[in-house]
């Protein structure tokens, strides 16, 4: 049985940036605190994605 330690907020934010996630949220598997928020935000991220930055195009004549 592996005993895992929780990650810090800084570690969570770093991982969010690394994988390109929309947001970093915390919840408790034991008490389920914050669990509804996590699912609500996941649904919101899918249904209302942020517009992607348009890449500037280089046009040569």
Image (cartoon, grey):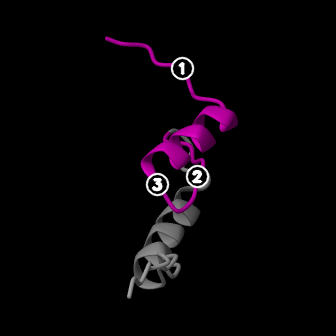
Q: Residue at x 59, y 39 (%)?
A: 14
Q: Nearer the viewer, mark 1 or mark 3?
A: 3
Tag 2: Cα neighbours inside 10 Å, few (<14), some, or many (≥20)? some
Q: Is residue 26 magenta?
A: yes
Task: Kindly identify which residue carries mark 1.
Answer: 5
In this rendered view, identify the residue nearer to me: 30 or 2.
2
* Quarter of the image with the N terminus in it: top left
The mark lying in front, picked from 1 and 2, is 2
| Mark 2, secondary structure of its residue | loop
Q: Residue furthest bottom?
A: 61
Per the rendering, the mark at residue 24 is 2
- Quarter of the image that includes the C terminus: bottom left
Looking at the rendering, the stretch of residues picked out in magenta corresponds to: 1-29
Residue at left offset 56%, top offset 43%: 28
Disc 3 packing (10 Å; few <14; some 14–19; many ≥20): few
- The residue that label 3 is drawn on is 20
Residue 16 image position (x, y, % from top left): 53, 47
Residue reaching furthest to the front: 61
Residue farthest along the left direction in this orientation: 1
Which residue occupies 58% across, 29% down?
7
Give the main secondary structure of the magenta stretch: loop
Mark 1 residue crowding within 10 angstroms, few (<14) / some (14–19) / many (20+): few
Whether 28 is among the magenta residues is yes
């Amino acid at each position: 049985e592996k005993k895992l330690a929780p990650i810090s907020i800084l570690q969570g934010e770093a991982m969010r940036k690394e994988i390109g996630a929309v947001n970093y949220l915390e919840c408790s598997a034991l008490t389920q605190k914050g669990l509804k928020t996590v699912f609500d935000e996941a649904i919101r991220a899918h249904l209302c994605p942020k517009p992607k930055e348009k890449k500037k195009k280089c046009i040569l004549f």
